[in-house]
Image (cartoon, rainbow, N blue to C red):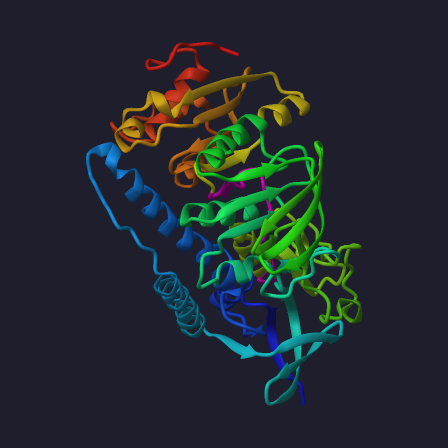
Amino acid sequence: MARAVDVLVIGAGPGGYPAAIRAAQLGKKVLLVERDRLGGECLNYGCIPSKSLIHAANVLDAARKAEEFGIEISDIHVDMRKLQAWKEGVVTRLTSGVAVLCKGNGAEVLYGEAAFTSPSEVLVKRADGEESVSFGNAIIATGGRPTDLPAFRFDGKKVISTKEALELEEIPKRLLVIGGGVSGLEIGTFYAKMGSQVTVVELMDELLPGIEPEVVRVVGRHLRKIGVTFHTSSQAKGWKETSDGLLVEAVTPDGPLTIPCDVVLVTVGRRANTDGLAPDKAGVKVDPKGHVLVDRQLRTSNPKVFAVGDVVGPPYLAHKATKEGIIAAEVIAGHPMEADYRALPAAIFTDPEIASVGWTEAQAREKGYEVVIGKVPFAALGRALTTGESDGFLKLVADAKTNRLLGAEIVGPDASDLISELALAIEMGASVEDIALTIHPHPTLPEGIMETAEAALGRAIHVLNRRL
């Protein structure tokens, strides 16, 4: 006899476990199936580990720069084993918290690998056997994983993914990063600050493809300052092992290039975890890349089955997955919900950080808006100067006719924290005047948002005004 549940959630990552918890809160009998660890790749092998290590690197960088403030620190040493142990402690604390939350909300957890056997049933392969589970509704939240290249297949030692890169117990002397996107630059920056000689090879003509060039230029300057070498419009073609490490052959605009390194980190994209799931047996359609096709309520071609998170395609953001998981659970419970990405923020933890929400200036113009821009450098903010982190800027994009905020970009200190105020403003339909009229405390970084709104209105105090 198959076990019967109201809601089956497959995958306990940032999309799956919130979906299971919310469905249970709404009175459903819920089973959450996970094949590895609660929290998924984000909590165990991605977002949390990387930000833990990046914070440590920033502490190290601050210690080295302390002499600028008259503070002399000598004999700085990094114990990578201790750092990795601390990082694992953070991860364990959070994964344990997820288990407590699931249990406390009445969502049962079953460890195993699920595969559909029909439109309303799965077979779960556990370590000690198999179990059939029938469901009223199911939510696919199996996430994704890093993809490699034909000439650079992951072996976990010489050619590694982001997972292994965040688990190294020795700092590589020379690190080659293939792919100058978000993960490549975040991890590359970490190792550069830790002392690695980092080289980045990017196929496109800019680092961070898809990000506004004026934002990328700020990050590019900082990469050069910390010793990162990067080659854009370039392609890594292959590698060989020598007595002195690895030699990677690349093609660049200046001709062939041989790059010596000790480890190759491949960060060229992600693939959906649908292989082994047998979605076809459930009548669930996927695209050629394996992403599950869904509508605005996250419902698949099988009306009983929903899908959320990385498995439905980019942008690959944990907070997007969480929101989608909650929406799917609400829809299953009969609530009138659907996904709305208009105020979906994104953050990149480079140095300096990048954050954005809404439309860029170019996107707003493409949509037919006449726009007005407010732009203020962090160098105009007293708080930024007092911390020694004054590079970068804040930029707001507004409708010239109504002054309604359409989008925002920040590159600079604490950008990932600052962007939430602007996401809320877009969600509420606020104007730049609403933001300008809101008193912000001084001296703080958020008052830069107020000043940028004033600049969009042509009445800034601390920068010269230019209404665009």
Judged left or right of residue 375, residue 85 is left
Q: Would you place residue 119 above or below residue 264 in this image?
A: below
Judged left or right of residue 317, residue 353 is left
Judged left or right of residue 196, residue 450 is left
Q: The N terminus appears in which quarter of the rendering?
A: bottom right
82 vs 73, nearest the viewer: 73
Residue 410 makes an appearance in the image: yes
271 vs 468, nearest the viewer: 271
Q: Is residue 335 magenta?
A: yes
188 vs 307, nearest the viewer: 188
455 vs 327, nearest the viewer: 455
The segment highlighted magenta reads 331-349
Q: Would you place residue 167 above or below residue 75 in this image?
A: below
Residue at point 41% right, 50% down? 194
Q: For residue 139, which quarter of the picture?
A: bottom right
Instruction: Locate residue 6, reporting x and y percent.
Output: 60, 73
Instruction: Locate residue 123, reporting x and y percent.
Output: 69, 80
Q: Would you place residue 461 above or below residue 350 in this image?
A: above
Residue at point 58% right, 65% down? 157
Residue at point 50% right, 30% down? 408
Overall secondary structure of the magenta stretch?
loop
Judged left or right of residue 296, residue 46 is left
